[in-house]
Image: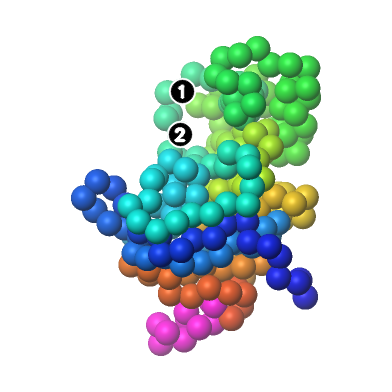
Amino acid sequence: MHNSPTPAVRLDALTAGYRSQTVLHEITAEIPAGRVTALVGPNGSGKSTLLGVLAGVIRPAAGTVERSGARRPALVVQHSGVPATLPITVRETVAMGRWAHRGPWQRLTRGDRAVVRDCMDRMGIAALADRRLTDLSGGQRQRTLLARALAQESDLLLLDEPTTGLDIEAQQEISRTLRETAAAGVTVVHATHDRTEALDADHCVVLREGAVAGVGLPHDVMNARAAGRN
């Protein structure tokens, strides 16, 4: 059994949304450091909005977000959200992860290129380095986006339903990578619809209609959620 780690993120009475629409209502929760946290809830429950707040791309309307880490969070969007016409290669995509350190379009150092190669190797896409994103399968594209996030070397990795629409092998590969990443000390937060994925996490936050409906160990929280639906 894990000892309770220091929170990587503390949310206190967080309210957030888009212009006149409030999506999250007074969210209070903690995200444990160096663990995998699953965000669970139906479409429209606020999972993507909460990821946006954690990533720093959505500003809270009220409440506070406290982070223990200093590095810019890495956000992985769904592979289907990548424009189909984006004319860049796998290597160029993964190299974008280094922009957090170098700035856009700056020349990469030898160290940067080594990180990019290592991340492509980790995700099994080194052989695809010169292929365009538009020529990849959904699973290959998602692994590329994850490699880009890993190349950022953040201490907080955020993913919006990273295995949706992928075959079982690709799902398992991504799930394994998330666990390895957390074991290396990175805090991982991923939104999911999948009960099995949620149960495989270390920690779980259930959202319903923009409010917290449960927080805790995945088995306890998911069973309570299932009982609540009966």
Is residue 176 something one can see in this rendering? no
Q: Which residue is mark 2?
A: 82
Residue 139 part of the magenta-drawn span:
no
Instruction: State the residue lying farthest toward the top.
Output: 107
Q: Is residue 18 above or below residue 147?
A: below
The number of numbered badges drawn on the structure is: 2
The local secondary structure at tag 1 comes to: loop
Taking the spot 71% from the left edge, 70% from the top edge, the residue there is: 4
Label 1 crowding class (10 Å Cα cut-off): few <14, some 14-19, many 20+?
few
Q: Is residue 157 above or below residue 4?
A: above
Taking the spot 71% from the left edge, 65% from the top edge, the residue there is: 5
Question: Mark 2 and mark 1 in contact (Cβ < 8 Å)?
Answer: yes
Q: Left or right of 127: which side holds 75?
A: left
Label 2 crowding class (10 Å Cα cut-off): few <14, some 14-19, many 20+?
some
Say which quarter of the image contains residue 72.
top right
Find residue 195 and report its horizontal and vertical position in percent. Answer: 54, 69
Q: What is the magenta segment's predominant secondary structure? A: helix
Taking the spot 78% from the left edge, 17% from the top edge, the residue there is: 110
Find residue 109 and report its horizontal and vertical position in percent. Answer: 73, 16
Q: Which residue is mark 1?
A: 86
Find residue 74 and report its horizontal and vertical position in percent. Answer: 58, 40
- At label 1, the amino acid type is Leu
Q: Left or right of 18: which side holds 187?
A: right
Find residue 64 and report its horizontal and vertical position in percent. Answer: 45, 56
Colour setup of the view: rainbow
Residue 224 part of the magenta-drawn span:
yes
Question: Depth check: 11 or 121 in front?
Answer: 11
Tell me where the magenta segment starts and ends, as one range.
221-230
The local secondary structure at tag 2 comes to: loop
